[in-house]
Image (tube, helix red, strand yellow):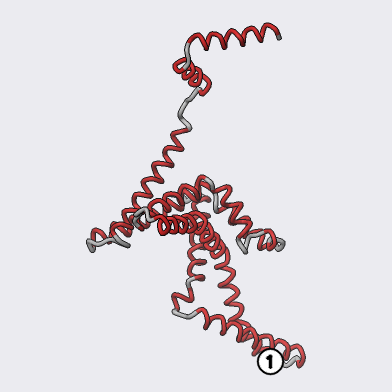
Amino acid sequence: MKMTKKSRITIFLLTLITVSLLCLMLPIILGIKIETITYSFLALLAVNCILFYLTEKTKNKILQKISFIFSIPLSIIHLIFSLGMPTGVLLFNAVILYIISFGIPFLIMDQIEILFNFGLKRATMYFFCISFASILSVYLSKYLLKFILKISPVTMDTYTEKPKNRYLKELTTVFYQKNNIIFLIYTCYFVFLGIMSFFKIQYEQPLLSTETDMAILQSFLVFIAFTNMIIKSKDIKLAPQTILALYAKIILDDDIIRESNTNKENKVEKD
C-alpha cells in the first residue's frame, strides 16, 4: 500500500519530535548534572573566545586548527539545542497550561480544605481538578492560548521581534488548538490506562495508589461524558420562543394572556 504524502509528513514530524525529546533528555540519559553541563559550556565558550582572539591577532595556522577543534563541541551543542528548542518551547508552554488549568485550582481547593476542613480526600481533589483541567484546557483553549502567549517568556510580544521567536509563537498557536488538545488528553489517558492496567494485571497493585488511579480514571469518564454532551448538544432542536410561550400559558392565567395579546394587537393597529 502506497503511503500518502500526509502520512509521510506525519511520520517525519513524529520522528523529529522524538529526536527533540532525546536531545532535551540527553543530560538525564547520560547521567550528567546540569551544573556540570553549564560550567563546561561556559569554560568551552571562554576558551573559544580566547583562541578566536589570538587567532585573529596572530593569524597563526596552528592556533587556527586548535580553534577549529575547540569549536566542534560548540557546534554540536548548538545543533542539539536547535533540535530540542521547538519541542522544549511546546513543553514549557504545556507546563504553563498545566499550572493554570490544574495547579492553581488544586492549590485553591487545598487551601479551602485546610481553612474549612470539609473532609475532602486528596484523591477527591485530584478528581475534581483533573476533570476541571481537562474540560477547561479544551473548551476555553482559545482564551488560554492568548494568555499563554502573553505571559510565556518565549512567546510574549517583547521577544517576538526576531523571526525565530515569531516562529515559536506561531508553532505554539498551531499546536495548542482545541482538537489537538483533545487528542493529547486522550493520548495521555490512553498511556496512563495502559500502564495502570499492566500494573494491575501483572503485579496486582496500583500504579500510583488505588484512590489516585480511580480518581484519574473517573476524571477521564467525566471528560468523555462532557465531550459527548457538547457534541450531542448540536443535534438538539430547541425552539426557545415557542417553549417560553408554552411556559407562560401553563404558568399564567388565560385571561392575562388574552389581555396581553389584545394590548399588542391594539398597539399594532394604532401604529
Question: Residue 203 at x, y = what percent?
Answer: 23, 63
Q: Residues within 10 Å of mark 1 (few under 14, many from 20)?
A: some
Along the viewing direction, whichever of 41 and 102 lies nearer the viewer: 102
Amino acid type, mark 1: Leu
Residue 250, image quadrant: top left
Image: 234 above or below 72:
above
Q: Residue at x 25, y 62 (%)?
A: 205
On the rendered structure, is 207 left or right of 173?
left
Question: Residue 4 at x, y = what percent?
Answer: 50, 49
Along the viewing direction, whichever of 184 and 244 lies nearer the viewer: 244
Placement of the C terminus among the 4 image quadrants: top right
Along the viewing direction, whichever of 160 and 3 lies nearer the viewer: 160
Residue 190 appears in the figure: no
Q: Residue at x 42, y 41 (%)?
A: 226
Circle 1 SS class = helix
Q: Which residue is mark 1?
A: 63
Q: Residue furthest front?
A: 116
Q: Residue at x 44, y 79 (%)?
A: 31
Question: Residue 38 at x, y = what percent?
Answer: 56, 81
Along the viewing direction, whichever of 108 and 132 lies nearer the viewer: 108
